[in-house]
Image (spheres, rainbow, N blue to C red):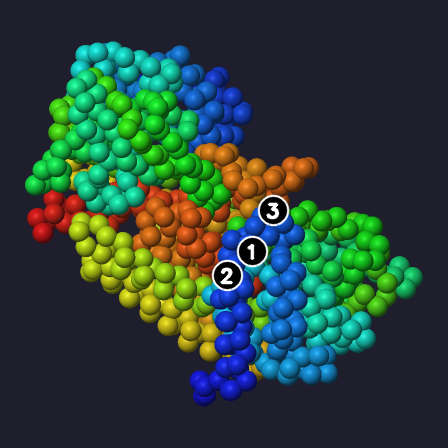
Amino acid sequence: VELAWSDEDIEFRDEVRAFLRDRLTPELQQAGRLMTSVYSDHDASMAWQAILHERGWAAPSWPVEYGGCDWTLTQHYIFSRESTLAGAPNLSPMGIRMVAHALVAYGSGEQKEFFLPRILTGEVFFCQGYSEPEAGSDLAALTMAATDDGEHLVCTGSKIWTTHAREANWMFGLVRTSRAAKKQQGITFVLIEMDSPGIEIRPLVMTSGEEIQNQVFFDEVRVPKANVIGELDDGWTVAKYLLEFERGGGASSPALQVMAEHIASAAADQPGPDGGPLLDDPAFARKLADARIRTDVLEVLEHRVLSVLASGGHPGPASSMLKILSTELSQTLTELAMEAAGPRGRIYQPHAAYPGGPVAGYEPPPDGYVSGEPWQAVAPLRYFNDRAGSIYAGSNEIQRNILAKAALGL
Amino acid sequence: MDFDFTGEQDILRDGLNRFLATRYDLERSRTAVKTGAGWQPDVWKAFADELGILGAALPEDVGGIGGGPVETMVIAEALGYALVVEPYVDTAVVCAGLLHRAGGPRALELLERVVAGSAIVSLAATEAASGDHWQDVETTARRDGSDWVLTGSKILAIAAPFATHLLVTAATPSGLSLFLVDRSQSTAGLELHAYRTVDDRRAADLVINELRLPSDALLGGEGQAAASLETARDDGAAAVCAEAVGCMRRVLGDTVAYCKQRKQFGQPIGSFQALQHRMVDMHMELEQSVAAVYLAVFNANAEPATRALAVSAAKATIGRAARFIGQNAVQLHGGMGMTEELAIGHYFKRLTAVQFEFGSTDHHVARYARLTRR
């Protein structure tokens, strides 16, 4: 058991810092610091991915043979924390952090060869087609039909909550290829090209005004069987494997630490609820301290899961715990950011932020006026969008069900 | 204590609810704020002429119907249930109260126009550095001959972009003073930066640079505005509490209905005990909020310290409830709660703003602690 950093780790940290100093442009840094959700501005995110790819750092968690980095666990952590601290935009999680793992574990040689390098360059940009209007928490109840037509599957149905469907050129999704007694059977994991005839996309306007999520309609869309990952009818195995990556296995504590640090520095300059600076208000100071304590502890929990991953294991039900803890902690921090923003947290000014998608029905003021600081404009958008944390990737209620069963045997 | 309404109050509430149910459209009102005038003048006119709610809590000598805090509570709750964006609390409660207490021909003449629906008044009291402490004013007013000259800045003046008049607080040599700005007069030296709020109200920041006002722009005595402003803030807080109760009633009703109808795992999600308990907790938060509003209303005309204690208790309770009910309503609606496709998304945003209006939850807890400290 060892949490301290070695000389090599410090050297690596300095290397990462030097890279970030050289390559993270002020524009990209703004886009990273003023994100309104976990999704960065698409163009900024792709530009940053290209810069990282050039350095060989776009997908450090992949196996080295496919372009990953031969880093220790500590180095992964350092890279993630330094990037967040410097204000780097987030990369889209769908390709690098999700479907790529399915490809590595279940993909054929041709599939790996085609997709993995293109995911790295950004030439292939994935969205996820899991949820359906009647299959959310109960994902296995999905009904989007894929009928066998020789060389193709013909898909009809609809997917919802598809992040960046309009920006994506590929979707990884779950379709129903047969009806079995057990609803988890008969599901197939497929990759669908988004410009296939028969696909229609309807953007959904979120409470933040952003159009990040979409509903995608499929009308007899032909998908080559060569795009099935794993076995036909056995997609649930692939999906379950991936869900553990979606829910945990990443490290959210660095981002949460940075959020807490930003709140602390902002609160030092804001009026408190009872006079004096907000940071000196005992109630606020304790709430912030409590959130930071939870973050410190989460960090150790995340390291423990990462060490399991590093030794070739997979996270298992602990990923459910990390998902609950990190999303609920993030929500607490967005509440504190709203408190720090004060009356200005009520002003709607997305033009001062870097939204994760187009903003519906909004004209920015012609003179670009912003009331207060950009972080105050971000605070409400982030607060609204962050409510999704306890809903997406399996609601926190579902995660608690999983833990009750898998961790406690209830 | 009497929890029964009078016959007149029942008529007022039923008439207003009927009007809002049949003639107040959620989509149309959001569009008015997002891309239109910022409000619906025809609705406001109906408030004045058909329903008489703008003067319901004001005396008959200014055109009102002589009601009081109970009328305000009944009206605000109904408006909250329908998620009305027009500035009832800001203009007809807060500013009307300030005008009434200030007295004098200009204030009373304007008050009559407020009751008649022909004037919209916006209060500009919050400054960037003041936060919830309206008495910490950096905007100043100085005498120049018989005129007053104002310099400073304000943030988040609700309804200011379409208001006919502004009430602006400023420091004068002997204390805090209140000034009336008639926007139909020349307002050189006054710059408005208009925007909308997350809960779909129009508002503005004010940049005031040597704004020259006539001597009768001073409302009430010079340096005498602090007490009236404190009352206005308590009145506003109490009314917003009642409004929030209306919002929360609607949100809880929608959530329960959704959970009865939404099926996952072959059964309505409302049949899951974990969700039932959550909704019961929401129900209890709502019931406490209703009681907290009564607490504020019963003490609305008490001496200032008693009134302040009751209003802070109410606002702190409603702040906690609005957060809990709003967040859990979104959670139980799942992804749909995150969108503007259903009403819930709009109500959630209002319930977020409510927590910060007329003093944040923590501000009122701190004030309560201060007032009860021996």
In the picture, the disc for residue B83 is: 2
Question: Residue A27 at x, y = what percent?
Answer: 54, 25
Tell me the CA gap for discs 2 and 3. Answer: 18 Å
Residue at horizontal 44 percent and vertical 31 percent from the top: A40
Helix, strand or loop status at disc 3: loop
- Chain designation of label 2: B
At label 2, counting other C-alpha atoms closer than 10 Å, the crowd grade (few under 14, some 14-19, many 20 or more) is: many
Name the kind of residue labelled 2 in the image. Answer: Leu
Name the kind of residue labelled 3 in the image. Answer: Thr
Residue situated in front as seen by the camera: A293 or A131: A131
Tell me the CA gap for discs 1 and 3. Answer: 10 Å
Examine the rendering and report whether any part of residue A302 can be seen.
no
Seen in the image, is A169 located left or right of residue B79? left
Name the kind of residue labelled 1 in the image. Answer: Ser
Give residue A361's quadrant in the image.
top right
Look at mark 3 in the image and give the residue it sits on: B35
Residue at horizontal 53 percent and vertical 62 percent from the top: B24
Residue at horizontal 51 percent and vertical 66 percent from the top: B22
Q: Does label 2 lie on the same chain as label 1?
A: yes
Look at mark 1 in the image and give the residue it sits on: B29
Residue situated in front as seen by the camera: B258 or A80: B258
Question: Residue B15 at x, y = what percent?
Answer: 53, 75
Q: Does label 3 lie on the same chain as label 1?
A: yes
